[in-house]
């Protein structure tokens, strides 16, 4: 179906492939500072969301089945990793490119990911709201962590 395919393509904006390509773009263009922020944010998001999903497991709206430890983390709905990744990516990229038009497109991308995650029945509304909040907090924190350990950039 064309609509479902479009929704899946849109939700991929919050996936690892897009996140990785943007991070790699910063690395290849010599902006190692932004690359470090993105890498650190991704590591923190995976760690935090994995712990939260294990402690407060919530079945996805589409009732994804799981058979083991790692598949249980993936089958968890709360909080939305796609929403968190998209938000962190938008914030860190928005700091690197402070132009209003770029920031507006990044915000629309986050909104698109949030909406598609709910429409595709991968998450509940509270999952994506928590994901956006977590992504924002983690992105903000990443700007303070490297200077603590490396004396800044």
Image (cartoon, grey):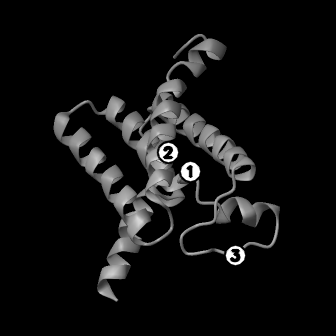
CB under 8 Å between discs 1 and 2: yes
In this view of the protein, can residue 24 be seen by the observer? no
- Residue most extreme to the top: 151
Expressed as whole percent of the image width and height from the top left, the position of residue 141 reads 53, 25
On-image quarter of the N terminus: bottom left
In this view of the protein, can residue 133 be seen by the observer? yes
| Mark 1 closeness class: few <14, some 14–19, many ≥20 residues within 10 Å | many
Q: How far apart are the alpha carbons under marks 2 and 3? A: 22 Å
Callout 3: helix, strand or loop? loop
| Mark 3 closeness class: few <14, some 14–19, many ≥20 residues within 10 Å | few
Q: Quadrant of residue 103?
A: top left
Answer left or right for 113 relative to 42: left
Callout 2: helix, strand or loop? helix
Q: Quadrant of residue 57?
A: bottom right
Q: Which residue is mark 1?
A: 79
Q: Quadrant of residue 100?
A: top left
Q: Which residue is mark 2?
A: 130
| Mark 2 closeness class: few <14, some 14–19, many ≥20 residues within 10 Å | some
Which residue is at 55% across, 32% downward?
36
Q: Which residue is mark 3?
A: 65
- Residue most extreme to the bottom: 1
In the rendered view, would you say 122 is above or below 128? below
């Amino acid at each position: 179906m064309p609509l479902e395919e479009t929704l899946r393509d849109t939700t991929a904006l919050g996936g690892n492939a897009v996140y990785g390509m943007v991070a790699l773009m910063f690395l290849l263009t010599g902006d190692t500072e932004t690359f470090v922020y993105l890498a650190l944010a991704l590591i923190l998001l995976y760690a935090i969301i994995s712990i939260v999903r294990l402690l407060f497991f919530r079945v996805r709206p589409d009732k994804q089945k799981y058979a083991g430890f790692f598949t249980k983390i993936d089958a968890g709905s709360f909080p939305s990793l796609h929403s968190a990744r998209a938000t962190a990516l938008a914030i860190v990229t928005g700091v690197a490119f402070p132009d209003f038009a770029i920031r507006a497109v990044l915000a629309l991308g986050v909104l698109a990911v949030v909406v598609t995650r709910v429409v595709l029945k991968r998450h509940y509304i509270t999952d994506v709201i928590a994901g956006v909040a977590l992504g924002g907090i983690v992105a903000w924190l990443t700007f303070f962590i490297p200077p603590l350990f490396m004396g800044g950039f």
